[in-house]
Image (cartoon, coloured by chain):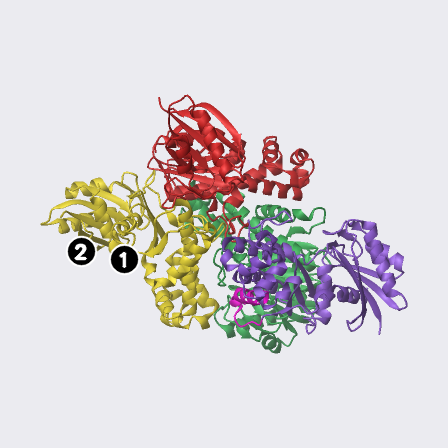
Chain colours: A red, B yellow, C green, D purple
Amino acid sequence: MTLTIGVDVGGTKVAGGVVDDAGTVLVQTRRDTPADDVAKTRDVIIDLVGELAAGRTIEGVGIGAAGWIDANRSTVLFAPNLAWRDEPLREYVGKAVGLPVIVENDANVAAWAEFRYGAARDADDSMVMFTIGTGVGGGIVLGGELLRGAHGVAAELGHMLAVPDGHQCGCGRLGCIEQYASGSALVRFARAGARQEPQRATALLELAGGETEAITGHMVTTAAQGGDPVSTEAFAQIGRWLGTSLADMAQILDPQTLVVGGGVIDAGDLLLGPARRSYLDALAQRGRLPVAEVLPAELGNSAGVIGAADLARRI
Amino acid sequence: MTLTIGVDVGGTKVAGGVVDDAGTVLVQTRRDTPADDVAKTRDVIIDLVGELAAGRTIEGVGIGAAGWIDANRSTVLFAPNLAWRDEPLREYVGKAVGLPVIVENDANVAAWAEFRYGAARDADDSMVMFTIGTGVGGGIVLGGELLRGAHGVAAELGHMLAVPDGHQCGCGRLGCIEQYASGSALVRFARAGARQEPQRATALLELAGGETEAITGHMVTTAAQGGDPVSTEAFAQIGRWLGTSLADMAQILDPQTLVVGGGVIDAGDLLLGPARRSYLDALAQRGRLPVAEVLPAELGNSAGVIGAADLARRI
Amino acid sequence: MTLTIGVDVGGTKVAGGVVDDAGTVLVQTRRDTPADDVAKTRDVIIDLVGELAAGRTIEGVGIGAAGWIDANRSTVLFAPNLAWRDEPLREYVGKAVGLPVIVENDANVAAWAEFRYGAARDADDSMVMFTIGTGVGGGIVLGGELLRGAHGVAAELGHMLAVPDGHQCGCGRLGCIEQYASGSALVRFARAGARQEPQRATALLELAGGETEAITGHMVTTAAQGGDPVSTEAFAQIGRWLGTSLADMAQILDPQTLVVGGGVIDAGDLLLGPARRSYLDALAQRGRLPVAEVLPAELGNSAGVIGAADLARRI
Amino acid sequence: MTLTIGVDVGGTKVAGGVVDDAGTVLVQTRRDTPADDVAKTRDVIIDLVGELAAGRTIEGVGIGAAGWIDANRSTVLFAPNLAWRDEPLREYVGKAVGLPVIVENDANVAAWAEFRYGAARDADDSMVMFTIGTGVGGGIVLGGELLRGAHGVAAELGHMLAVPDGHQCGCGRLGCIEQYASGSALVRFARAGARQEPQRATALLELAGGETEAITGHMVTTAAQGGDPVSTEAFAQIGRWLGTSLADMAQILDPQTLVVGGGVIDAGDLLLGPARRSYLDALAQRGRLPVAEVLPAELGNSAGVIGAADLARRI
């Protein structure tokens, strides 16, 4: 049994764990992220790896972080939630901890974890995963390997075009799928619904203290689980859009399995039900050809640590 | 030097050729396709292969055909222009000609030819090709191999969603990119333009004998090359849509190279100019990240024979 | 009691009737339309008016025809189904029959009939009517008068933009509401549904002898009335689009009443149910403001004769 | 010569003036708006009218305010920028000042001023005006009278549907034209452009001190007038959308004249150029039919006072 360490660098927390070759997390720990200080964020990672490695034989370290990672899995080119710009994280951490290090995009890491040990573990060749959090991330496995792309930035699924001239995306374009199938879109749709038809959003508005602008994703999930009509419809809206993107993935990549993860998947069939219907509708023209199943992610928050640790095995 | 045979089965012609391991076509021949007769189409293929193989040492036969091919590259599941339904073409032809046979989708075959010997020959890992003919086809190479998908139907790029609730597609859905970036769309846009503003389409209408409904793709190309405003704008329209799909491919797959082929590419920069502009516009948010170049296909009609023959080398 | 004659010139039939000042048709008759012969079509009208006028005191003649009529209600500028181009119909028929004549667009005529004697007879000031036939026509009454427009072509409601870059319209543009809320759209949606999911369109396909392309609007109505899922959904599709246009009319004109007529309204709530829901959804943001009711037309095919005759009273 | 008083109640200022029957403002004055205090806002109006009326013979008072006004022009049903809800303004002010009072929506008032004395003064029957400020307002004149609607809320042109599933509108729906053709949209487009392509927005970013989020509508206008590419393109974007709405108005109402006003029109042809092109494009299918001209408003900020005063003449 060999051990590796996986580190998941988020905008608010850095989580780390020691993982065995069955994908089991043996020890886990977490620190706050000093997000606006490049040097301190590195130091937190190094300190955390040191703590986890103490007294153990570790083969390598995998680090997952939101952002663009270069094709060598060494340098963070750009991280939306952190101060990193062209940060040579692999080299820096590697030298400090004396272990081989690999850096990977966080949505890719999660997809890899689900492919190896989670929802897609029965797939041996291919899967596509959408991570539905505040934004929309993606990870693609083809031929049993994570697809990294010629410049390291494959699987940026959130910026596929969904609606020409649609809702303005933070990236500058109009109509990216991230504006229709994300947690932010869920909240936007729910707020709009509550403003338009408050009498159909009484449970949601109660959770928000009567303030439409105070509505959060958690509240929409809670209210929808209790049957609140506006909240349920907000999930149906993002689900329908997600379904069309899942169908695009089936048309383009024809994978064995499709997985949906990220925080919003806690809502389960409130999201997946409408997503599957719109997915199958969009593929109806294929007639009797089999289609990939759409499955919920299974590893939750641990996917980042498990996936990063497993990638460290493959350096 | 080893030789293989490539066969390109179209709706009106069956073309075949003997190809060497440098991708050179040594001999070529073609027959009419008896499109509505399953048995006769098989016989034409067998006869043509027999003729080409006579007196030569042939290693194998590759067959490209429009339609869905199963994941084993053996059976034509469905062919839109031919009578084949679940046709075990590999087995049937293989037995008849006594050679190993492989069957592949025609757009995949063309992409493979361009990857090996054409526009993308400098790429060693990945490329995506759009084939713009009457419809829109696609082929994807990743990790140096053609992407076939779990069910054999990857790279159906024509049925990505472009416009929600958009123009009705023959597949039953509204708004597939095939309705906006194909040769059919080119003709539709040009006819509409000529009907709306005949004074800006005088050259095009002259070619069509004054009959809007008589306008063909060839006429639009000829008129656009001569500067006809409506024809030029029709190319710009399909080019802009093509550009957004090329950008989607860069976001999803981040390939080394993007190639545009098919009959419509004869128009060159009339199509590629607007396509590249809308592609770069859509990727502008990536800032200083490098982006794949968009190149015109180089092998023209021979891509089918060359690609199929080359795939036969890899059975 | 005064009498006038109303004439309804369609692409296949010319209908005429003698109408009293309560909107009652006392006598009615019809002829075939010699649609491609300008002179003969005029003669048929004159002959039919002569027959109806014989032995009666007639105050005037109103003629309704598809197409653009000039602002003086005298000249047919363009008629899509007839050979008329700048046809001075008022003068020609007036001289021939020795009576005052008025010419009006057919959808305007129908709207006027419904305003005076049909679904909107309780409105004394304003109504908007959508006529859903093969295409989408419209008529607007404001201040108790038919809105004619500065150039005679107001209320061309079928060519409001519904979907930017949407389905190609016969007029040359992409995405006119006529491509989404008309009888042609109904048939297109139903055919697409039957092709994609034949098992959900068994009743419809039986009516069409198993031929998707043989499906007509009548068949869709019949099948939907019997519960055929694909046919019902096709009505829901055009109904939803109609609802958004009805809402646009409420935002722009705030009329007392909205009316939906034309052949497709025979389907009743199959069309009006979804239309009303999407209408109310779109106006939900208005909160407690009252909204105009959406009513089905009541006069059916007679609206043309009744409306034209009534307009003749107001020359 | 008779005199009336016009009052223009905005969210920050109340402006008032004495206007003669040639539309000339003889005296003008303004106060701050105590926007969140219903009673104080009324008192400011009354005080201002009292001051203006002192020593003059005044025939009546017209008050323009943003919001929904009831069909009797008496009660402000809802005002987005003020605390008024079902405020019986006509009665209250009328009693206090001892003069006949009329209350009207501010965009209607501006349209009326332009119809009587401004850009559309040559029209004697019909015009439609779009007011492009932070949002999009509208006013419609038909038959020489302001169109008020059955419930007083006609001409809410900002909430026509432009893009199905488009950018979220403050009203709760997706895709209202207000999200594409308003001053807010101008700023949103310019910010997005500056973020995506800062090197094409150097002049604009300099005005904003390098902060994308600090960009205002004034800065976009200034930069565009100096040739800044991103700013110019932002005007072209909102102009193109405005053009499609102008075309919808021509299809629906066929008015004599179309007018564009509001603060954004200060940019002149930067906005009107693209608007006119997209307007004419959209109407190209009408062929040789004449189309209404699109003119810039002429009365600027005074339109509110002039229009309200003129309406007071017609009580």
Q: The C terminus of chain A lies in which quarter of the figure?
A: top left
Chain at tag 2: B
**Which x, y percent locates residue C7?**
60, 66
Q: Disc number at residue B28?
A: 2
Magenta segment includes A296: no
Classed neighbour count for the residue bearing mark 2: other residues with Cα under 10 Å, few (<14), some (14–19), many (≥20): some
For residue A303, say whether it is visible.
no
Q: Disc number at residue B300?
A: 1
In the image: residue A51, left or right of residue B47: right
In the image: residue B58, left or right of residue B158: left
Magenta segment includes D285: yes
Query: Foreground: B110 or B102?
Result: B110
Residue at (80, 51) in percent of width and height: D87
Q: Are marks 1 and 2 on the same chain?
A: yes
Say above or below: A6 vs A105. Answer: above
Q: Amino acid at mark 1?
A: Gly
Q: The N terminus of chain A lies in which quarter of the figure?
A: top left
Mark 1 → mark 2, Cα distance in angstroms: 15 Å
Query: Foreground: A91 or C259?
Result: A91
**Which x, y percent locates residue C169?**
49, 59
Q: Amino acid at mark 2?
A: Gln
Say above or below: A273 vs C215. Answer: above
**Which x, y percent locates residue A232?**
58, 36
For residue B200, say whether it is visible.
yes
In front of the other: label 1 or label 2?
Answer: 1
User: First in sequence: mark 1 or mark 2?
Assistant: 2
Q: What's the magenta bit mostly, secondary-structure-wise? A: helix
Say above or below: C95 vs B88. Answer: below
Q: What is the magenta range?
A: D271-290
Circle 1 — which element? helix
